[in-house]
Image (tube, helix red, strand yellow):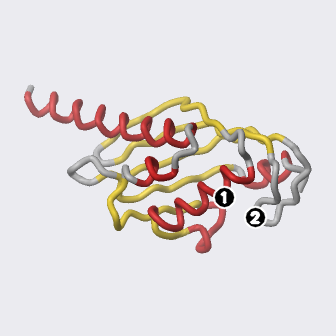
Amino acid sequence: METLNKISLTEQTRKGACLAFFSAYQDMDTARMIQLATPDATVHFQPMGEDGKGSFWEFGKGVWQLIMDCFPDVDNTVDSLTAEDNTVTAHVTIFGTQKQDFMGITNKGLKFNSDHVFVFRFDEADRITHLDINWDHASFCRQLGA
């Protein structure tokens, strides 16, 4: 029974870390977002291929800051969290209005609403060690008039 309680508590702690990440995202606080991860954590924005891989603390922070700068009303809704072993999968809707050119997409003042899948991996101390992020990039581009 104690093992089950520890597993349940660990899952809840990790889900809580994910919710803290998305809360910081809503607050546009990249410092809080990255502090949930180990210093050597990595991130992969999958639709960007190899160019979408890098350090969580530097590359990830830079991408999230660019999103916040280009979509100043960016927001998210966490639709579900599923925990298994050291992994939490979050299904999240992200939405906002473009106010600046973004990664080759000219600003037309259009809105996007995009389902994303975030797969967080954690260490034994319940800190993020890796994050995979996936979304329908073609749909995202279409919504922004690209």
Give 34 or 87, whichever is nearer the viewer.
34
Quadrant housing residue 63: bottom right
Left or right: 100 in relation to 44: right
The image shows residue 59, relative to residue 26, as above or below, that is below
Looking at numbered disc 1 in the image, what kind of residue is underneath it? Leu
Looking at numbered disc 2 in the image, what kind of residue is underneath it? Met
User: Which class describes the residues within 10 Å of circle 1: few (<14), some (14-19), or many (20+)?
Assistant: some
Q: Give the distance between the C-alpha atoms of the residues marked 1 and 2, in whole angstroms.
A: 9 Å
Tell me the quadrant of the picture where the N terminus can be found. Answer: top left
Q: Which residue is mark 2?
A: 103
Name, please, the residue furthest toward the bottom.
50
User: Which class describes the residues within 10 Å of circle 2: few (<14), some (14-19), or many (20+)?
Assistant: few
Q: Earlier in the sequence, mark 1 or mark 2?
A: 1
Q: Which residue is mark 1?
A: 66
Q: Residue at x 66, y 50 (%)?
A: 68
Tell me the quadrant of the picture where the C terminus can be found. Answer: bottom right
Contact between marks 1 and 2 (CB within 8 A): the answer is yes
